[in-house]
Each structure stands twice: as C-alpha cells, then as structure tokens.
Amino acid sequence: MLVRFVASSRLPTEWGDFLMHGFEDPASNKEHVVLTMGDFDNGEPVLSRIHSECLTGDALFSLRCDCGNQLRTALQAIAEEGRGALFYLRQEGRGIGLLNKIKAYRLQDAGADTVEANERLGFGADMRDYSLLGPMFAHLGITSVDLMTNNPRKVMALSDLGIEVRQRLPIETSSNPHNEKYLRTKGAKLGHMFRAD
Ligand SMILES: Nc1nc2c(ncn2[C@@H]2O[C@H](COP(=O)(O)OP(=O)(O)OP(=O)(O)O)[C@@H](O)[C@H]2O)c(=O)[nH]1
C-alpha cells in the first residue's frame, strides 16, 4: 500500500509558523512529516529540503555529521523565503536504522570510513528509498522545486518521480575535527558536491 496522508496541524518553531503534515507508510510501518510554509497554488518552484532522519545530529547535537546544521539551515532559509517545504523522512542512518548506525560509528572509531562501515555490516553505502515521496508531493500539490542538497542522488530521485528540479541549491555547513573524514568520504565515495572549509 502507498504512503498516505493522515493529518495536519500548525507547528510554531523558532524560525516561524509551519504547517506539519503527517504521512504513514504501511509497508515499512514508518511515519514521516513534511513542514510547509506558504501557498503552493501558483505552481512556482517550491524551496525544498529532503532531510533524512538523524537522531544523533538532529536531536542530540552530534558533531559526527552535518545533519543538525543542515536541518536548521534549511528551516531558516524557508522561513526567510516565507514559502517552502521540508520533507523529514524517517530513513535513519541512510536507511540502516539507528542501532546499525551506532554499530557503524563503532567501526568508524576503529578506522573504517562511513561507506566501509556500512559494507562491513552487510549494507549498501546508501539504503534510502525516495519513491515514498511521490504520494507526499502529490498530496501537497508540489510539481517543481528548488532543492537544497549536495547529494546528486536526490536530484535524480525527484526527476524519476516526475518532479522538476529547477535548480540545486548547495547546503554548505562548516566542518569540525569530528566530521572532517565523514564529509571527505561523502565527497569521494558518495558523489556529494561538498566544498570543505
Ligand atoms: N550509515 C550511516 N549513516 C549516517 C552516518 N552519518 C550520518 N548518517 C545518516 O545519513 C543521513 C544523511 O545523509 P547525508 O549523506 O549526510 O546527506 P544527504 O541527506 O544524503 O545529502 P544532503 O541533502 O546534501 O544533506 C541521515 O540519515 C544520517 O542519520 C554514518 O556514518 N553512517
């Protein structure tokens, strides 16, 4: 069964008032949310971010990745524009889940990079599936986006779903000693268009 819309409510945040739309995915038993601001009726491209859940970076202030920083940067950019959408997909750890990500971090502490760690656990480098976005875009009436990402796979995934990506907007965040290797590996092995500080 396809991902389906369940309910919306107001979500005031430190950047402004968003609408929060909840979706359920019966196949994976996952719940996803989209935060929107403004009106999409005129068909103009919508400033958008497709963000993959990162409990450690988004909620626990981790410096091992750039996720929390990107989340805040995206919400701020949407609020400044007064119009946009943030898709928050519950695909933790590039789709391997939180506990496997902790195991992957352990392997990284022992010298593996983020891709090698996934592989040693028996996973591909990136297990995320973006097809679930189709019904979410349809429900919100968004057909064209300006996408905040450094990840070319997301641009291709949206094109495959028939969503026009008018432009890719880089989402640069600063590096620190804890995430330098991770950011380098994303550039070298996962095709991210990352420019280190
Ligand atoms: N398996 C694994 N997942 C990680 C690791 N560090 C961060 N993540 C997850 O990676 C996801 C974010 O992916 P990124 O590759 O950082 O960025 P992206 O979303 O592909 O691309 P951008 O749009 O440019 O941010 C989140 O689900 C994080 O939980 C790691 O070392 N191992």
Image (spheres, rainbow, N blue to C red):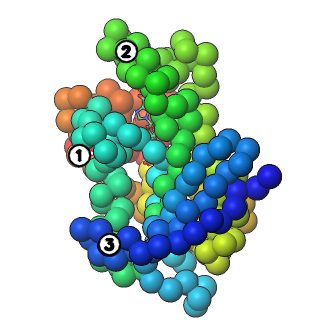
> What secondary structure is found at the residue carrying circle 3?
strand
- From the viewer's side, name the closer residue of 59 and 110: 59
Q: Are marks 1 and 2 in contact (CB under 8 Å)?
A: no
Residue mark closest to the camera, 1 vs 2: 2
| Pointer 2 residue | 106
Of the numbered discs 1 and 2, the one sitting upstream in the chain is 2
Question: Is residue 46 at least partly visible in the picture?
Answer: yes
Please state the horizontal and vertical placement of residue 28, each as a whole percent of the image.
Answer: 68, 41
View extreme (left): residue: 177
Q: Residue at x 32, y 14 (%)?
A: 109
Please state the horizontal and vertical placement of residue 4, each as a whole percent of the image.
Answer: 69, 61
| Pointer 1 residue | 174
> What secondary structure is found at the residue carrying circle 2?
helix
| Pointer 3 residue | 12
181 to 167, vertically: above or below: above
Q: Quadrant of the C terminus?
A: top left
Q: Amino acid at mark 1?
A: Ser
Please state the horizontal and vertical placement of residue 175, each as a whole percent of the image.
Answer: 24, 39
